[in-house]
Image (cartoon, grey):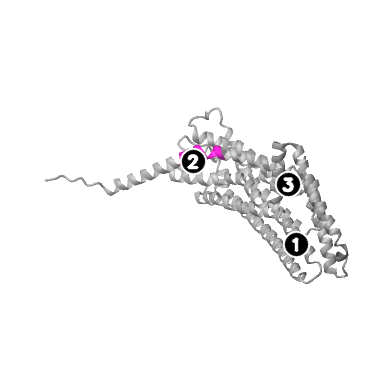
Amino acid sequence: MMNSTVVPFSATATSEVSATETKSQTSGDIINAVYPPILIFVGVTCNVLIILVMRTKQFCRQSTSVFMTTSAVNDALSLVISMTTHWLYVSFEGIYYRNDVKGICKFLDFYGWGNCDFGILITSMMTVDRALAMTFPLRFKTKSIKRARVVVLVTVLIVVAKEFHFLIGSNMVPESRKERLCDVFPGTESYKFFWKQVWPWLHLVYLSVCFIIIMGSNSVLLLQILKSSNFQKIFKKTSKNSKVTEQTKFNYSTRMRKQLHTIAPMLIGESLVLLLLTFPFSVQLSISGYDPEFYSTPDMGLLFSVTFYMLYTNKCVTFFVYLVTGGKFRKSLKQIFRRWFKGKKSVRKNQFNNFSKWYSIKGDLQTMKPICRSPSSEVWNTGSSLSSDIQTETSFVVSTHL
């Protein structure tokens, strides 16, 4: 007679759960060890390149460059300070002596939360600035550097006021928790009420207002770009049978090329990436209810790591968004690399070649002056619009940063 051993269902279920948790723990350890160094290196390098491009004369006189430079500095510092500290804690056990670094979490939570909220608010203000500039081009100055700096200062004050409470309640997590170094532990009943009841709603309203502003401003930017494109199409159709067909075609292609080089597509791309990469972390915080015990299991720890790194990936991909959507950004970056690898003479030679091409086009257009001075108001407007485009192209060629 054979003896059969029956394995209880609860034991089988427990082993499956244990295997799942082990897999989650292993995945989390690999992500924590490999991904942060890549983020830090790529992110700092890309943000430094953004700062250099914003210092060129093609950008430095526009108010948007102040916001973009501030955002790049903010992202680079965040990766160097917050991400480096987080990576050392999750990858190297016992690297921080708790008795010696008790106050570090007050700064890290204050700076970490403030850095992310500041980045979102700066993007909101930047899209509003550009939307107003495109909607009211005669009333709203795009080169008001002073106004942009004042907006940045006010933004800093708002964020400091919002995140100040972290200097009171933040502390290091217990040794059993590995997903992060710091968390909030209320010491009084009043602060506990604020952290559990007031802060979640305050943060949710803050993010909601910022996201609504970003989406609204991007809608305005898209509408203005579409209006410009439709105007050009209508203008081209009405000019097909006129005597200035060649000039109209040249004017149309010049304006469309100029439109593709504007900052608006860069802002739209950055805003979409921001919403895509920061929204999951906000949802995860809302689900957790800001309860430290929510992340006690390996699965929840892995969830935190994935959404947390998505949040910081946003601080790295901005450069690539600008590179894809900004024609003027690409040109400025090429000039910087040409200057690094080939010297100033190569940059000046390239400028001279571009200026020669523009001058030859100008000479060809001067032969069309009798046509441009046709009694038709449409033709005259075409000529003046073309002249303004050529002047813009001239300023772009001549005002290269050396």
- Element assignment for label 3: helix
**Left or right of 142 on screen, residue 94:** left
Residue type highlighted by circle 1: Tyr
Give the residue number, with chain letter if any, for mark 1.
252
Name the N-terminal-most of marks 2 and 1.
2
Q: CA distance from mark 3 to mark 1?
A: 28 Å
Give the residue number, with chain letter if any, for mark 2.
31
Please state the horizontal and vertical placement of residue 162, each as a whole percent of the image. 64, 45
The residue nearer to you, when weighing 370 against 89, is 370
The residue nearer to you, when weighing 5 against 344, is 344
Q: Is residue 84 visible?
A: yes
Name the N-terminal-most of marks 3 and 1.
3
Q: CA distance from mark 2 to mark 3?
A: 34 Å
Give the residue number, with chain letter if any, for mark 3.
65
Name the N-terminal-most of marks 2 and 3.
2
Q: Main secondary structure of the magenta part?
A: helix
Q: Say if mark 2 contacts mark 3, CB within 8 Å.
A: no
3 or 1: mark nearer the eye: 1
**Left or right of 244 on screen, residue 293:** left
Please state the horizontal and vertical placement of residue 86, each as a whole percent of the image. 54, 37
- Residue at 63% x, 49% y: name it: 321
Position of the C terminus, as image quadrant, is: top right
Location of residue 166 by image quarter: top right
Location of residue 348 by image quarter: top right
| Circle 1 Cα neighbour tier, 10 Å, few/some/many (<14 / 14–19 / ≥20) | many
Residue range of the region highlighted in magenta in the rendering: 28-38
Whether 343 is among the magenta residues is: no
The residue nearer to you, when weighing 264 against 195, is 264
- Residue at 53% x, 28% y: name it: 99
Whether 34 is among the magenta residues is: yes
- Element assignment for label 2: helix
